[in-house]
Amino acid sequence: MSKSEEKKISRRSYVQIAAGSIAGLVVGGALGYAARPTAPPTTAVTETATRTVTEAATQTVTIVPSIEPEFRVVWAWGCSWFTGYIPAMVAAATICKMLNMEIVWQGVPDCADIKYAEFITSKLPTLDAERDAVVVHYIHAMSDACKKALDRGLGVFASNCDDYTVPEYQRNRLSYVGQDEYQAGRVNALYITQQGLLKKGDRVVICMPQRGIEPHERRAQGLHSVLETETGCVVDYISGWGSEIAKIPEQLAAYYRGHPDVKAFFAVEGGLGQGFEAFMRSVDLAPGSMPNVMWDPTEATMASIKSGYITGSDDQQFYLQGFFPPVIIWLWKNAFTHFMAPVSINVGATIVDKTNVDVFEKFQAECVEQVKALGWFTF
């Protein structure tokens, strides 16, 4: 028997075994996420983990299963500083180990679209279409590069920032796991309006670091649909600080002084929560006096929830964003190629507020400590 025939038989056996348990894997993982405060994912790949830092601007982390893997997941992220995404890393590494897939984390510390797009554009041509699949963020920033990769047979999958409704994105990746940005915006607005904190004619403001970023615009549209169309609020927009978080308190204070009748603030990304408490303090707003919803439960945002300055924050369900892409990739590599397209999954939206911030903070801290212990990152 030739080596190639042995490999085919070995792969067929592995597929039969793994396919028989794939449903249990998905259900069990989802249930594990639901129970995350008391049972965080602790399956670590300590005996096989390796870490390589290629250069200051690019980090590479490789997790290799103990059996020789047939497939490799290259996960390219654009916010390596954001510890809120760490649960996705823990989930992805755990699932890849269970499915005997190597996972490589690569990315840039700064999530600015241009830097990330440049990194992805240079990275995609180096990947092996037969062996690799890539998970990317911000499809809108590098659609052409993703389309070229797909055309040569590389599996391109999206996580975290995408949009179900934009045909261009659908043509440039095989599936998306993350929030429906529009619906997530609605959930955040409804969190405030359903508490009776706003009425018709109230002025509210949607805060955006800059205009034109597609996921942020879709989130804003979802917010707007509830706040203006359904509730009758007067909706203002402010933007302009980009990635310079230090500018947020001053810019919000300037808006507030010109519009002291504003009743609520809404974010579309994680930066606002890091400067919101400083803004409130600068204009002498007491904790709890200004309803607001941030996006992404960063450490600063969770601290401000506990102090009462932030009402709540959208949680993008990062554990699920890490859990499902490896499962979809495994199925695509083994079973879906000839008769079924990879599935997209909306992970939904939950709100972190004073009722659950402690258990959420504990779970996130445990995930961070786990990746620190493995030497994946230096925070």
Image (cartoon, rainbow, N blue to C red):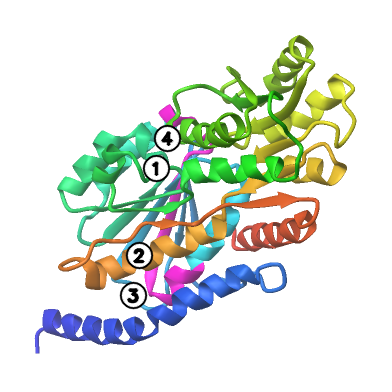
Query: Left or right of 218: which side holds 278?
Result: right
Which x, y percent locates residue 71? 30, 66
User: In front: mark 1 or mark 3?
Assistant: 1
Inspect this view and state whether residue 323 appears. yes
- Disc 2: CA contacts within 10 A as few (<14), some (14-19) or many (>=20): many
Disc 1 element: loop
- Disc 4: CA contacts within 10 A as few (<14), some (14-19) or many (>=20): many
**Residue at image mark 4:** 116
Q: Which amino acid does label 2 sit on?
A: Ile
**Residue at image mark 1:** 163
N-terminal-most mark, 4 or 3: 3
Is disc 2 in contact with disc 1, using a CB cutoff of under 8 Å?
no
User: What is the CA distance from the residue labelled 1 to the residue labelled 3?
Assistant: 35 Å
**Residue at image mark 3:** 68
Q: Give above or below for 247 relative to 374.
A: above
Is disc 1 in contact with disc 3, using a CB cutoff of under 8 Å?
no
User: What is the CA distance from the residue labelled 2 to the residue labelled 1?
Assistant: 18 Å
- Which residue is at the front of the view, 168 or 101? 168
Q: What residue type is labelled 4?
A: Tyr
Residue 5 in which image quadrant: bottom left
